[in-house]
Image (spheres, rainbow, N blue to C red):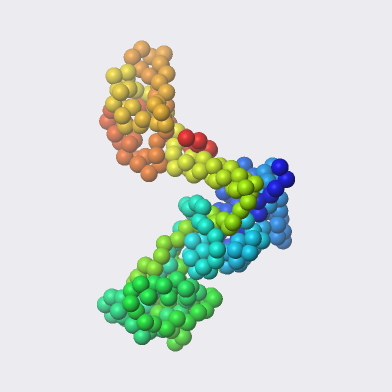
Amino acid sequence: MNEVLRIAIQKSGRLQEGSLKLLKDCGLSISNGKDQLKTQASNFPVEVLFLRDDDIPQYIEDGVADAGIIGENIFAEKQKAGEIIKCLNFAKCRLALAVPRTEQYSGINWFEGKNIATSYPNIVSDFLKRNNITAGIHEISGSVEIAPGIGLADAICDIVSTGSTLLSNGLKEVELVMKSEAVLVAGKLDVGKKQILSKLVFRMEAVQQASNNKYILLNCPNESIEPITNVIPGMKSPTILPLSKPGWSSLHSVVDENDFWEKIDQLKKLGAEGILVIPIEKMIL
Ligand code: ATP
Ligand code: MG
């Protein structure tokens, strides 16, 4: 097979590290020199293009790139042809409306007749329409937070992760407009490229599953095996190995990262001892 899937990722910025790490965790061997604009994985039919994130949706629509890793916010704003294939669970942030901290904010009607500075005119305009608000939108490409302070607009809509930038510019977040995370987007693909993409998605799922789960080993009295199995049933069922100490076993299973601490408490109450928790690299269900 000599077909190659071209995947665009951000050249530099907040998405770059996570995108490269994901591709590498999927087993792709990629070299990324500083000034390199494209590179071919040596062991998988993928070519990686390094581009500005804002340009990626257009490249996908034009078929110059077959797929890309971008923020959902950029995908929604650009309104280009393409389909979200998978949410990637990194670069999580939100787009929010913020107003000067000194404003008495009474609700969304506050925005009626106001001017909003943003780099996301389409998303903001859709949001205002949905809420029956008429407001001016002032598109600027960066440093949006200073707009109210210099008299350019009454409010802003921008990306927020912790809110500290807003705070230091005298603003407060008042409305959530959209949540975003990195997503894998693809354009129209022929059969060969679709096959490569689904292979890659399969690997991404294995990586994601693994990062959501931990391998757990513990010792327990034999009479506790059943209640412990109910708490951590694992993928099919736990592995039970006898300890050389009579009446005791070692139990191996998999536990979901999210309810990990709660489970540990239950396990201790059920008599588990010597609990070891180990990261999983890949997990195929
Ligand atoms: P480029 O030069 O490629 O256009 P940029 O300056 O537009 O880059 P970045 O600031 O690197 O973009 O952000 C890229 C994406 O990362 C955003 O579109 C958003 O999806 C996500 N992002 C932005 N800020 C944060 C944040 N504080 N926390 C988490 N994710 C974020
Ligand atoms: Mg950008």
Q: Residue at x 69, y 49 (%)?
A: 4
Q: Which residue is drawn at 42% across and 23% down?
A: 239
- Closer to the camera in the image, 118 or 274: 118
Q: Position of residue 56 (x, y in %)?
A: 60, 63
Q: In which quarter of the image is the N terminus?
A: top right
Vertical arrangement, residue 25 with respect to residue 159, above or below: above
- Closer to the camera in the image, 11 or 267: 11
The image shows a total of numbered marks equal to: 0
Looking at the rendering, which quadrant does residue 170 occupy? Answer: bottom left
- Residue 279 appears left or right of 266: right
Q: Which residue is drawn at 31% across and 80% down?
A: 110
Vertical arrangement, residue 89 with respect to residue 75, above or below: above
- Closer to the camera in the image, 282 or 3: 3
- Residue 56 appears left or right of 244: right
| Residue 12 is at least partly visible in this image | no
- Residue 282 appears left or right of 102: right
Vertical arrangement, residue 120 with respect to residue 40, above or below: below
- Residue 42 appears left or right of 170: right
Looking at the rendering, which quadrant does residue 106 occupy? Answer: bottom left
Q: Where is residue 24 in the image (x, y as percent from the top left)?
A: 61, 46
Vertical arrangement, residue 178 with respect to residue 214, above or below: below
Q: Which residue is drawn at 42% across and 31% down?
A: 235
Q: Position of residue 181 (x, y in %)?
A: 47, 58
Q: Position of residue 50 (x, y in %)?
A: 65, 60
Looking at the rendering, which quadrant does residue 236 occupy? Answer: top left
Q: Farthest residue toward the bottom?
A: 151
| Residue 37 is at least partly visible in this image | yes
